[in-house]
Image (cartoon, helix red, strand yellow):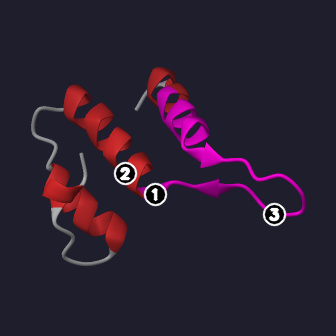
Amino acid sequence: MTKKHYIKIASIIKDNTISASGKMLPSINKVKLVSELSVMFMRDNELFNKHKFINACYGGDMIAKYIK
């Protein structure tokens, strides 16, 4: 991976972080994060397997069609 990949991943994480006011820590929208990372990886590598990536992210047999 190159610097541009790390910058894009950081941007995707930032865009999917929900900032809460007060004393709560920020949280991540996991569904959207996984989906956007999948899009980035598919654009970078035509052999990228979205279904395997989603299953790995969720630690089980996640149905990829529910992740847009």
> Secondary structure under badge 2?
helix
> Secondary structure under badge 1?
helix
In three-dimensional space, the C-alpha distance between marks 2 and 1, rounded to whole angstroms, equals 6 Å
Q: Callout 3: 10 Å neighbours few (<14), some, many (20+)?
A: few
In three-dimensional space, the C-alpha distance between marks 1 and 3, rounded to whole angstroms, equals 17 Å
Earlier sequence position, callout 1 versus callout 3: 3
**Residue beneath disc 1:** 30
**Residue beneath disc 2:** 34
Earlier sequence position, callout 2 versus callout 3: 3
Is residue 61 placed above or below 8 in the rendered structure? below
User: Looking at the picture, how far across and down is residue 29, in whole percent?
Assistant: 51, 54
For the residues bearing labels 2 and 1, Cβ distance under 8 angstroms: yes
Could you say which quadrant of the image residue 66 lies in?
bottom left
Q: Mark 3: which amino acid?
A: Met
User: Looking at the picture, how far across and down is residue 18, in whole percent?
Assistant: 64, 48
Viewer-proximal residue among 56 and 29:
29
Q: Report if residue 34 lies within the magenta region.
A: no
Could you say which quadrant of the image residue 16 lies in?
top right
Viewer-proximal residue among 55 and 18:
18
Q: Mark 2: which amino acid?
A: Val
Viewer-proximal residue among 6 and 30:
30
Q: Which residues are magenta?
A: 8-30
**Residue beneath disc 3:** 24
> Secondary structure under badge 3?
loop
